[in-house]
Image (cartoon, helix red, strand yellow):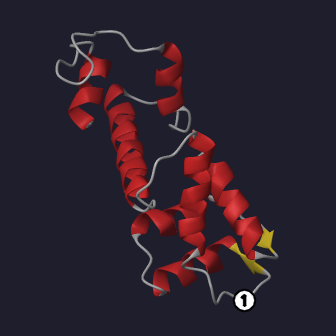
Amino acid sequence: MGAFLDALIDNRGATGFMGDTKLISPALLQRHLHKAGFPATRGELLAHVREESDRVIAALRELPDRRYSRPAEVSRAFAESVSGYLGDMSYPTRRDDLAGHAERQGAPWPVVEALRRIPDRRYDRPEAVAEAVAEEEE
């Protein structure tokens, strides 16, 4: 996937993935760069997109193996997989406590990273954590 994104950003095309295309939708490009820190160099943008791609791939590997109908359904399924590492968590709690607890439970890095990315606020129940993860991943 990194070579594909390099090709898109370099405007060299990417044969074998989407045919001989040299164009990318501006909306798709904006989506991939939404959380990049600006101002940024080309190299920094490439690094950001690679990191985001790795994060998405790792999160998808945590999903149950079934057919999904919509992106929101994928976000909810991932949030449910995150919740599985928080079963014995005491509430109320905060983001850093959630991430630390998941890490101690042996959660894979996409789960811990997802918890680190939710808003830093008080969470009173597991459903609130799942909602925050699903919203962040959408």
Which one is nearer the viewer's eye here, 68 or 52? 68
Asked if one can make out residue 41 in the rendered structure from this viewpoint, the answer is yes
Q: Residue at x 58, y 39 (%)?
A: 70
Give the SS element for disc 1. Answer: loop
x%, y% of residue 53?
A: 37, 43
The answer to whether 61 is drawn above or below residue 99 in the figure is above
The residue furthest front is 67
Q: Residue at x 60, y 73 (%)?
A: 83
x%, y% of residue 131?
A: 72, 59
The residue furthest left is 16
x%, y% of residue 9?
A: 32, 20
Image quarter where the N terminus lies is: top left
Q: Left or right: where does residue 120 sit relative to residue 41?
A: right
For label 1, the crowd category at 10 Å Cα-Cα, with few meaning under 14, some 14 to 19 and many 20 or more, is few
Q: Left or right: where does residue 74 sit relative to residue 20?
A: right
Q: Residue at x 54, y 19 (%)?
A: 27
Residue type for callout 1: Ser
In this figure, which residue is indicated by the disc labeled 1? 90
Asked if one can make out residue 116 in the rendered structure from this viewpoint, the answer is no
Residue 96 location, quadrant: bottom right
x%, y% of residue 67?
A: 46, 47
Tally of numbered discs: 1
The answer to whether 77 is drawn above or below residue 9 in the figure is below
Which one is nearer the viewer's eye here, 65 or 14? 65
Q: Left or right: where does residue 48 sit relative to residue 118?
A: left
Image quarter where the C terminus lies is: top right
Which one is nearer the viewer's eye here, 125 or 92? 125
